[in-house]
Amino acid sequence: MRARAGAVACAAALLLTACGPNPSGGLRDALEREYPPAPRQGLPEAGAGRDPDVDPVADLARPRWLRETAERTGIPRRALAAYAGASLRLAETMPQCGLGWNTLAGIGAVESIHGSYLGASADADGLVSPPIIGIALDGSEGVMEILDTDGGELDGDVRWDRAVGPMQFIPTTWADFAQDGNLDGRTDPHQIDDAVLTAAHYLCESGGDLTSDDGWQAALAAYNRSVSYAHDVADLATSYREEPAAQEPGA
């Protein structure tokens, strides 16, 4: 599938643009540059007795849904739990946004192959290691120029900023939007629940209603201004949401 190949190719380039400052005129640019329409947003099945206001995001989705969806899509279950839980949390705290787990999964696929770029993986606690750190944003061809803003605290670079973590946040955006998805009292861009919940907030703040074409396009333009990136995310989000075709009796 083109979208899956695109995700691997984009991650392999790691990552000429990433989740950065919300660009002025993001929606206008998106419409003029033929961004894709919004894919249908999917909400996972919630686990029995789970409360999105008090439980960590990784615990919010129904275990059976996680198992079956991971098998169907090939998304690692630990990453899928973060995508699903973040969408369930936002359905409670920002219901007007309408963000689906499948858009988060599409972004996670393109940004870092669900936290598995160059052999990385998320452990049971959601920490992705080895850390996924992007190229220096030094103004070279195809790359933004952003001088260091965090003293190298997040990205290990005291000269230039770099995008970090499975959802590839630059330090300034992380500082503005960071969320504690696993409720451990800290925010860490390398912890997948924190990273995905932060991405969810950033998208909703940037786009408003993500079930609309205008809102989804504005959100994706804020996250990454590449048209091909938006098409890959849309294709993946659509494929992830698709349910398997029902078999005929006796098939």
Image: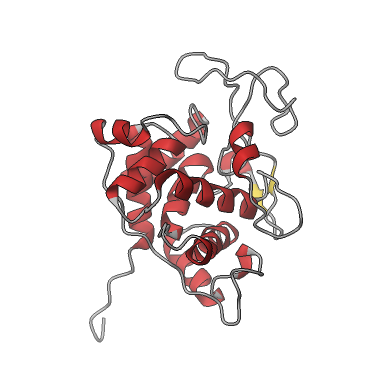
Residue 226 in picture, x, y percent from top left: 37, 31
Is 9 rendered above or below residue 250? Answer: above
150 sits to left or right of 93: right
Colour mapping: secondary structure
Q: Residue at x 66, y 69 (%)?
A: 55
Is 21 rendered above or below residue 185? Answer: above
177 sits to left or right of 188: left
Residue 75 in picture, x, y percent from top left: 50, 57
Residue 121 in picture, x, y percent from top left: 64, 49
Residue 246 in picture, x, y percent from top left: 28, 76
Outermost residue on the top side: it is 140
Whether residue 5 appears in this view of the structure is no
71 sits to left or right of 6: right
Quarter of the figure that contains the C terminus? bottom left
Is 13 rendered above or below residue 122? Answer: above
Is residue 211 or residue 193 the one in the foreground?
211
Q: Residue at x 51, y 20 (%)?
A: 144
> Which quadrant would residue 248 be assigned to in this image?
bottom left
Q: Residue at x 33, y 37 (%)?
A: 27
> Which quadrant would residue 73 be assigned to in this image?
bottom left
